[in-house]
Amino acid sequence: MDRKMNIGVFLMGFGHHIASWRQPNTPADSPENLDFYRDVAQIAEQGKLDMLFVSDGLSFNHLSHPSELVRFEPFTLLGALSAMTSKIGLAATATTTYNEPFHIARKFLSLDHLNRGRTGWNVVTSYYTGEAANFSQNIHMEHNERYTRADEFLDVVKKLWGSWEEGSLIRDKEAGTYFDSERLHETNHDGHYFNVKGPVNASSSPQGEPVIIQAGSSPQGKAFAAKHAEVIFTAQLTLEEGQRFYDEVKKLAKENGRNPDEVKVLPGVSIYVAKTKEEAQAKYDELQELIVPEVGLELLSEYMGGFDFTNYDLDSPLPEDLPESNGNQSRRQLILDLAKRENMSVRQLYKHVAGSRGHRILIGNPEQVADDLERWFKEGGCDGFNLCPGNYPDGLSSFVDLVVPELQKRGIFREEYEGTTLRDHLGLEKPKPSVVVNA
């Protein structure tokens, strides 16, 4: 079997477990400590992983994961990590709701030049409602309109990325010619949301274009991903759910005239691994004991549209009258489905959510973990995984030291990087930029 897994790392400060910051050996300043991020990035690169992914948000939320209360702005962080790594992809979240296409196009091209073609853009539409107040808005844009705006936003960005044709910078000192003006193009986009002249003042990407990543699993999110995404981050808890999602987005991609093999589906998974399953379980249990009940409950409340659980019996199932949410639709539904399928009480549910933000949790020895990942990979559940370690650096270094060699032994994960760009790692073709010919 020549097909290999693609594996990324979702980097979130202390780790994805909401209580990871409380462990005695965890540096308390991790989210604002560049040395910490450097060490994690280099561990991931040592493991030959495809990419390091950094999420983002544009508002303060005291209910957030501790890693999200204070954290580096992604372009600043990944710019620094570009100089500290040489192969691993570096992907950042940037919202289309509270940004302008020109800014985003320029920033991602700049980052792609800094790291010589290792950049990816996780396109989001801002589900944090508090962000509106930081951008002179009274209310948060409705879910459907956010995706309509995002579609045009991405169209403009790609046109700007195509401003400079490949090879248009001649830089001929003897002739005194720096660029070929015939191969430089204005964008001249006149749309519903944006009017952008262009061109962008950054030349064409070393990998054709930065890789487009998308993480929404709502109907609108899947339609957007099928049209644009080259990598899809998702949260599926069972193989059957994963297979349904995988089949659906691949079919939608084909209906959009795309090659389904050029759309990589990477579900999130939070892995606790040690030489024995008992040791791995102990790692997880230690973190679970550190959850502050009020914090875990508030986090669940946020996902459930702000429902007040204060006077509710925590050993009862979720109430039926949960409010609708204008936030993260797919994650809310995933948690509702989990609670129903596993017959979970509110207490059990908030502990699970606090332990992985709703992602699948996998606990075992290296062979057990590899068996599970291989099954998902070979039985049509994914093209690989987006790792969500409970804590850093142990959660990642344990995976690299114990699981990666097992996957390599089975022939389903690389032993060396195949190339130098993120597209090389993912097995994606170099696209032809969307060049707009000058009128």
Image (cartoon, helix red, strand yellow):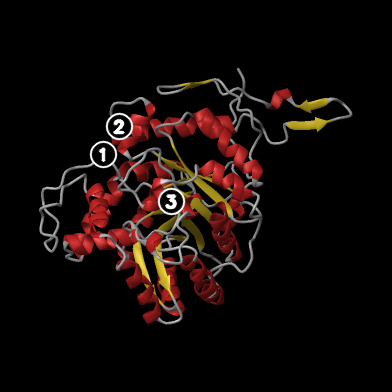
Residue at 18% x, 64% y: name it. 344
Percent x, y of residue 135: 38, 28
Q: Which residue is mark 1?
A: 326
Percent x, y of residue 112: 61, 43
Residue at 16% x, 63% y: name it. 345
Residue at 59% x, 67% y: name it. 414
| Residue 250 seen by the camera | no
Q: Give the number of the disc on residue 232.
A: 3
Q: Which residue is mark 2?
A: 140
Relative depth, front residue between 427 and 217: 217
Instruction: For the C terminus, give its image quadrant.
Output: top right
Q: Residue furthest right?
A: 174
Residue at 48% x, 55% y: name it. 30
Name the element at disc 3. Answer: strand
Percent x, y of residue 26: 45, 63
- Drawn side of residue 143 relative to residue 88, left or right: left
Relative depth, front residue between 107 and 437: 107
Relative depth, front residue between 25 and 324: 25
Q: Amino acid at mark 3?
A: Ile
- The reply to whether discs 2 and 1 touch (Cβ–Cβ < 8 Å) is yes
Select label 1 or label 3 by which is in front: 1
Instruction: Quote the CA–CA distance across marks 2 and 1.
Output: 8 Å
In the rendered structure, which disc, 3 or 2, sits on the residue that comes first in sequence? 2
